[in-house]
């Protein structure tokens, strides 16, 4: 089963985006793009985005799998170390069929304070909610994400 899944992902990663997204039978409605932390902070970006994806799954949304997100980012010429802006987020989200939620953001650091900024768009690119929350130390990133999503007070 694992070998079959890995083979499927490998094959899907080399197909053109139009075939990749339109003919695949994926039940997803939410695109979450990697949080921008800086060009030299890719690991923190990946870990923080994974936490965000887990929180959104907990809320009951159906996420586009990471290989699809990476492929659409590649199509838009956006790398993991680049900040995703509003225009690119909309363009990439709309490239994925049936996407009604698009989430992107960034994490910045000043001294020992980390500030998480998130923007949640509908499928047409209208802002549903946007905000930022900060805290001391890297461990505050997860609580900031939870707060921004309304999972904690």
Image (cartoon, helix red, strand yellow):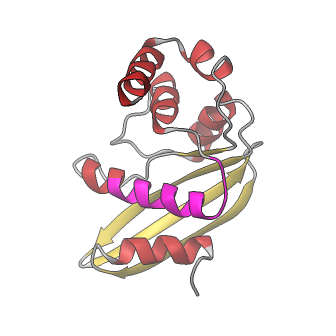
In this view, the residue farthest toward the bottom is: 153
Q: Quadrant of the N terminus?
A: top left
Residue at the spot x=47%, y=38% of the render?
Answer: 66
Q: Nearer the viewer, residue 59 or 147?
A: 59
Which quarter of the picture shows residue 9? top left
Q: Quadrant of the C terminus?
A: bottom right
Instruction: Measuring from the top left, give residue 108's x and y in whole percent.
Output: 36, 65
> Count the marks: how many?
0
Query: Up-down: is 76 above or below 88?
Result: above
Instruction: Measuring from the top left, give residue 146's x and y in whole percent.
Output: 52, 74
Q: What's the magenta region?
A: 47-62
Which quarter of the picture shows residue 123? top right
Residue at the spot x=45%, y=32% of the render?
Answer: 70
Q: Please, what is the dominant secondary structure of the magenta stretch?
A: helix
Residue at the spot x=29%, y=57% of the render?
Answer: 44
Q: Nearer the viewer, residue 142 or 118?
A: 142
Residue at the spot x=36%, y=78% of the render?
Answer: 140
In this view, the residue farthest toward the front is: 1
> 12 left or right of 100?
left
Q: Does the magenta-highlighted stretch encompass residue 24?
A: no
Q: Does the magenta-highlighted stretch encompass residue 48?
A: yes
Q: Nearer the viewer, residue 114 or 22?
A: 22
Instruction: Measuring from the top left, give residue 18's x and y in whole percent.
Output: 62, 15
> 67 left or right of 18?
left
Query: Up-down: is 52 above or below 16?
Result: below
Instruction: Measuring from the top left, give residue 150's x and y in whole percent.
Output: 62, 76
């Amino acid at each position: 089963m694992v070998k079959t899944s890995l083979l499927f992902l490998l094959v899907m990663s080399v197909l053109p985006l139009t075939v990749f997204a339109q003919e695949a039978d994926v039940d997803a409605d939410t695109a979450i793009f990697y949080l921008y932390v800086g060009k030299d902070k890719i690991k923190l970006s990946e870990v923080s985005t994974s936490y965000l994806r887990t929180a959104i799954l907990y809320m009951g949304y159906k996420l586009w799998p990471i290989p699809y997100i990476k492929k659409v980012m590649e199509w838009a010429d956006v790398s993991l170390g680049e900040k995703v802006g509003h225009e690119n987020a909309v363009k990439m989200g709309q490239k994925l069929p049936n996407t009604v939620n698009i989430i992107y953001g960034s994490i910045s650091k000043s001294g020992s304070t980390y500030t998480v900024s998130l923007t949640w768009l509908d499928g047409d690119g209208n802002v549903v909610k946007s905000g930022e929350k900060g805290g001391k130390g890297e461990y505050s990133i997860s609580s900031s994400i939870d707060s921004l999503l309304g999972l904690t007070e």
